[in-house]
Image: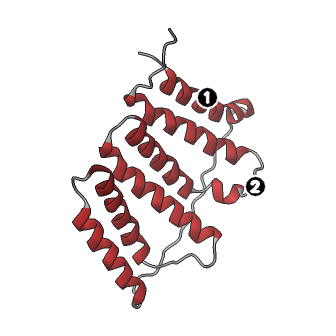
C-alpha cells in the first residue's frame, strides 16, 4: 500500500512564506522580465497573502482566509497602480478590497462577513461615483547592504526556498 504524504497544517504558512521570500530576493539578484515591479514591496504583500490563502485552503484554517484575501488584494492593487495606467487610483479601491474579502469569507464559511462585506462594497461603489478626497502618498526607500561576501548574497534566497520546502514536506 502506498503511503500518502500529508502536509502538516502548521508548516504550510511558514513554508510558503519562506519560498516566496526566497523567490522575491532571487528576483532582486538577477535579471527577470518585470524585475522592477516584481522586486517591489507590493510583492511582499502578495507573498504573505498567498501564504495565508494556502494555509486557509490546504490547512483548512478558515481564520487565515481574510488576511490572505486582504493582503493579496492590496498587493495586486499596488502592482496594478504601477503597471497599468488605467488602474483606478481611488480610495474606494481599499474599501472594495476589504468588502470583497469579507464577502468571500462569508461565501466560504457561511458564518460571518456578509453585512460588513455588503456595506463596504456599497461604500466603495458610491465612492467611485463621487469626488476623490484622498490623494495617494508614494514613498520609496532603498536599503543598502554592507560588505557581505558575494556568495552569501547569491545563495541565501535559495536557502529560504529550501527551508520552505522542508517546512511543507517534513512529516513530524
Judged left or right of residue 132, residue 148 is: right
Mark 2 secondary-structure assignment: loop
Judged left or right of residue 112, residue 50 is: right
Residue 14 drawn above or below residue 7: below
- Residue drawn at 40 percent across, 66 percent down: 97
Circle 1 residue: 159
Judged left or right of residue 65, residue 165 is: right
Task: For label 2, count other residues whose C-alpha is less than 10 Å away and answer few (under 14), some (14-19) or many (20+).
Answer: few
Front in this rendered view, residue 133 or 57: 57
Task: For label 1, count other residues whose C-alpha is less than 10 Å away and answer few (under 14), some (14-19) or many (20+).
Answer: some
Mark 1 secondary-structure assignment: helix
Tell me which corner region of the image, top left, top right, bottom left or bottom right, holds residue 95.
Answer: bottom left
Coordinates of residue 36 in the picture (x, y in percent)? 69, 59
Front in this rendered view, residue 38 or 95: 95
Spot the residue most to the front. Answer: 1
Coordinates of residue 16 in the picture (x, y in percent)? 50, 37
Circle 2 residue: 33
Residue 132 in view (yes/no): no
Amino acid at each position: 500500500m502506498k503511503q500518502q504524504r500529508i502536509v502538516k497544517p502548521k508548516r504550510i504558512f511558514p513554508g510558503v512564506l519562506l519560498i516566496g521570500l526566497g523567490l522575491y530576493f532571487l528576483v532582486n539578484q538577477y535579471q527577470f522580465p518585470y524585475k522592477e515591479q516584481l522586486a517591489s514591496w507590493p510583492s511582499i504583500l502578495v507573498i504573505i497573502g498567498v501564504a495565508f490563502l494556502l494555509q486557509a485552503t490546504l490547512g483548512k484554517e478558515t481564520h487565515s482566509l481574510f488576511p490572505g484575501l486582504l493582503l493579496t488584494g492590496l498587493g495586486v492593487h499596488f502592482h496594478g497602480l504601477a503597471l497599468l495606467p488605467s488602474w483606478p487610483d481611488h480610495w474606494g479601491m481599499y474599501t472594495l478590497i476589504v468588502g470583497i474579502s469579507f464577502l468571500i469569507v462569508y461565501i466560504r464559511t457561511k458564518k460571518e462577513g456578509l453585512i460588513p462585506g455588503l456595506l463596504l462594497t456599497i461604500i466603495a461603489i458610491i465612492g467611485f461615483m463621487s469626488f476623490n478626497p484622498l490623494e495617494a502618498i508614494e514613498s520609496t526607500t532603498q536599503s543598502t547592504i554592507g560588505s557581505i561576501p558575494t556568495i552569501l548574497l547569491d545563495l541565501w534566497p535559495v536557502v529560504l526556498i529550501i527551508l520552505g520546502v522542508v517546512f511543507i514536506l517534513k512529516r513530524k
